[in-house]
Image (tube, rainbow, N blue to C red):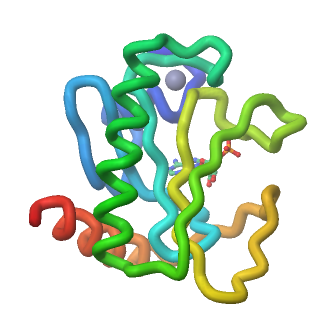
Amino acid sequence: MHQDCIFCKIVAGVIPCFKIYEDEHTLAFMDINPVNPGHCLVVPKNHAPNLFESDDADLARTMAVVRKISRAVQKALNPYGLNLLQANGPGAAQSVFHLHLHIIPRERDDDLRMNWGLKSGNKDEIAAVAEKIKEALED
Ligand code: AMP
Ligand code: ZN
């Protein structure tokens, strides 16, 4: 665990999250500042600050989980579209320096741009969407 890394703390269970999925190497949880409902994150449990310094096996496993969660989001929410996003460095608006993939369901005419402003989501709504995605994962 990397001492000052918030996602390492989430992986270790020191900080709570709205967990969707976990296996030996990977964790998926809801973004607390969702740009759209269903916005979630997938991280390798091993710390790597960004894509450049990621481990091959961790990256492959993370991407497999990204696909699994994306399928569940697609099934649960039937969004207008779905984007993946992954930021490297402050110039790319990376704010948490533990590798993570954003899964972003799109809404029609949401006019989403690449670097959106962080706005706290409603915790009850985030929890409710997390349940829907988890149910779709079980099917
Ligand atoms: P990035 O700009 O790609 O580094 O994105 C980091 C993301 O992590 C942002 O969308 C934040 O809303 C999200 N985030 C930060 N802290 C937490 C947390 N404790 N739980 C869930 N998501 C978080
Ligand atoms: Zn970390």
**Residue 16, visible in the rendered structure:** no
Q: Position of residue 54 (x, y in %)?
A: 55, 15
Specify the farthest residue to the right.
91
Name, please, the residue furthest toward the left: 139
Above or below: residue 65 compared with residue 72: above
Tell me which residue sits at (65%, 28%) in the image: 97
Determine which quarter of the picture holds residue 26.
top left
Q: Give how far across and how far down residue 82 sits, in percent.
A: 53, 66
Query: Could you tell me if residue 103 is visible in this image?
Result: yes
Q: Nearer the viewer, residue 6 or 61?
A: 61
Asked where in the image residue 71 lies, by quadrant, the reply is bottom left
Eyeballing the image, is 36 above or below 92?
below
> Furthest-bottom residue in view?
109
User: Horizontal placement of 35 versus 125: left or right?
Assistant: right
Q: Residue at x 50, y 76 (%)?
A: 37
Using residue 128 as the reference point, say whether residue 5 is left or right of it: right
Please determine whether, in this image, residue 20 is positioned above or below residue 63: below
Q: Residue 139: horizontal and vertical position, in percent?
A: 10, 66
Q: How many marks?
A: 0
Quadrant location, the N terminus:
top left
Q: Residue at x 63, y 20 (%)?
A: 49
- From the viewer's perspective, is residue 2 above or below residue 39? above
x then y, percent, for residue 57: 38, 14
What residue is rendered at 56% in x and 50% in y?
102
